[in-house]
Amino acid sequence: MYEQNNNPPSDRPTAQRQDAIDISDFVFAATGSRVRRLTMPDGEHWFVAADVAANLGYANTRQALVMHVAADCQTPLDDLARGVCGADASHKIAGHGLKKSMRMVNLRGLISLVNGCTKPECEPFKAWVSEVVATIQRDGSYSLEPAPVQPAPDGGTAYAMPQQVANAIVRLEERNIRADESMVALQEEHNGLLRQIGHSQHMMADALRDIAQSLRRPAESRHQPAPVPELTPQQLLATWKAKNLVVTDDIHAVAAYLAPALVHGEASYRLEEIATRTGLPHDRVHDCLRMLLKRGCVRQIGCTPDGAPVYVLP
């Protein structure tokens, strides 16, 4: 049951001395709702019917006035302002968003709207009406008290918040803090799970790589040819002799001359060179080479640029 007052208390005129329209917001302490109020020079208060109906939950302001408010308790704002309409009054009306076509109700009309409402929104207003009636019965009159105020951050005037609203805001803030803490904990848990999953994936990748390498090594070993033991010229000649491939001393002499080069890859000698080294005639060297080729001891893969044949082991 508070009234906004932007003027210093010492400058505020009394009802008997007031000579202009005074407009301010009537604030219900129980709900924090604000209803625009117009105070006439004689001190009578008129309230914007649309504000009252909206706060009480009425869907149709005009219908609510017809059903619940007597004709002498309601009037258009234009009728109220007509007798005292001056530059100051017009400025105040426009500054508060009031239109002269708005319907206004006095205190009795406001109480009638409250008593005629059955919606839950009207309960704080009915409590206020009960307080008004009790005060009138006790003191013989009821006046609108100035609202307790505190400095606003922008330098204006701010109303003290009703305790019920303050308690609700505190509870909401506490719930938001708990929700934020729970969200942070869940995020940390989620991040921990992601780290564990990433570590497991790395371990699995390493294990798969090891398995692949293990499977690849036997396959590579299977495809690699077995190392051939290196032959010596003597072993090569013994092999040929065991198979009765060398049957004469001449053939053995030619084979012994070719063997050292054959065990290391290729033997490339001209016929004349072999004849000179072995002391055999050219035609005899030729016959010995044909015998080695025929028996499969060697095979010819070509000739050098100077015409010397190139022999290798088969």
Image (cartoon, grey):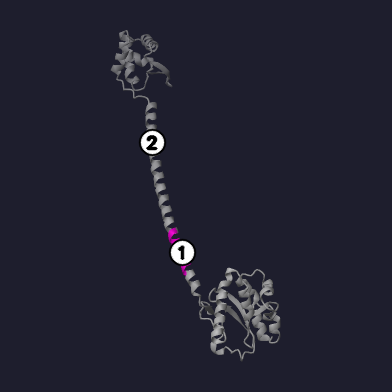
The residue under the point 63% across, 77% down is 112
Checking the image for residue 175, the label placed there is: 1
Could you tell me how far apart the alpha carbons at marks 1 and 2 are, in whole angstroms? 53 Å
Across and down, in percent, residue 210 comes to: 37, 37
Q: How many labels were placed on the picture?
A: 2
Number of the front mark, 1 or 2 = 1
Q: Which residue is mark 2?
A: 211
The amino acid type found where label 1 is placed reads Arg
Position of 70 with respect to 225 (left or right) is: right
Q: Residues within 10 Å of mark 1 (few under 14, many from 20)?
A: few
Closer to the chain start, of discs 1 and 2, is 1
Position of the C terminus by quadrant: top left
- Which residue shows up at 67% across the image and 74% down it? 65
Type of the residue with mark 2: Ile
Give how far across and how far down residue 23 sits, in percent. 62, 82
Q: Residue at x 41, y 54 (%)?
A: 189
From the top left corner, tell me how far across and down residue 244 is, in percent: 32, 9
Residue reaching furthest bottom?
A: 17
Find out whether residue 181 is within the magenta segment: yes
- From the viewer's perspective, tell me whether residue 290 is left or right of residue 135: left
